[in-house]
Image (cartoon, grey):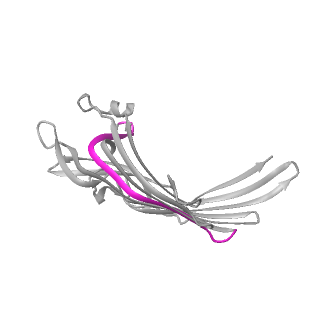
Amino acid sequence: VYRLNDEHRLYASYSIGNKEPTRRDYTRATPGSRPQHETLFNVEAGYRGDFGRFYLGLNYYLMRYDNQLILTGEINDVGAYIRTNVSESYRTGIEAEGGVMFTDWLQWSGNATLSRNKIPEYTEYLDNYDVAVFRQDEIIHRDVDIAFSPSFIGASILRVARRGFSAELQSKYVSRQYLDNTQSASRSLDPYLVNDVLLGYSLGALTHVRDIRLSLQVNNVLNNLYESNGYTFGYIAGDETQYFNYYYPQAGRHYMLQLVVGF
């Protein structure tokens, strides 16, 4: 870390990490395809600055993996996700965060990540049921996105607080995510934007009570229809490749009312 002054600083780091497969990774694998540990080489550099009522942070990262354990997009017989090793892969991107206090009662903060999450070469294995003796066909995909790795994520919070009343608009955007490592739009989660509203009011102190606060949270206030997760699998039958996608739809508009009494 290098401090330019009390308000501004630069930093950089390089680290190496190793992670062993979990017990589930072993139990889901066949004896001939036991998973290996993954190794991460991570480089980061960034800047943080405070400008009175405004702050800004920027961070660049490069994460290079050997034998990264990644999700295949499939699940096992009890619904758990399956992972496999890929010899080479990387994640690189820029993270930004910032905030501004417009007045004593109005402020905004947000963050965003723009990234590339790539596998230079990935081999997809498909069961082939058109042959007399069971076999798996191999399909090689090059320069594809890692499954469940959106290239852009953004979040925003706009807050108003005045005389015991507070209101927040919380927004989150997630770009397209692929269900497997083939980067096929037909096997992906559509981008989605979700907005939540949080309202609160403090009634102040009463006899024997330090504070009473009432809050109402309206999640997905615009009632957007979206899925945040899912899985896929495929095979070859009838001289064609068939894929099946399954999605987890999220709740539409819903509410939570809360009463907090402090003594």
Magenta span? 77-104
Observer-nearest residue: 244 or 195? 195
Observer-nearest residue: 51 or 150? 51
Looking at the image, residue 114 lies above or below residue 17: below
Please say whether residue 73 is visible from this viewpoint.
Answer: no
Residue 182: x %, y % from top left: 26, 53
The residue that appears at 59% across and 59% down in the rendered structure is 6
Residue 205: x %, y % from top left: 83, 55
- Relative to 252, 27 lies left or right: left
Residue 192: x %, y % from top left: 44, 62
> Hey, which quadrant is residue 189 in on the image?
bottom left
Looking at the image, residue 262 lies above or below residue 58: above
Q: Is residue 90 magenta?
A: yes
The residue that appears at 30% across and 60% down in the rendered structure is 185
**Residue at the farthest right position:** 207
Main SS class of the magenta portion in the image = strand
Residue 220: x %, y % from top left: 54, 61
> Hey, which quadrant is residue 135 in on the image?
top left
- Relative to 169, 124 lies left or right: left
**Residue at the farthest left position:** 132
The residue that appears at 21% across and 46% down in the rendered structure is 123
Q: Is residue 91 magenta?
A: yes
Please say whether residue 262 is visible from this viewpoint.
Answer: yes
**Residue at the farthest top position:** 31
Looking at the image, how many numbered discs can be counted on the residues?
Answer: 0
Observer-nearest residue: 52 or 236? 52
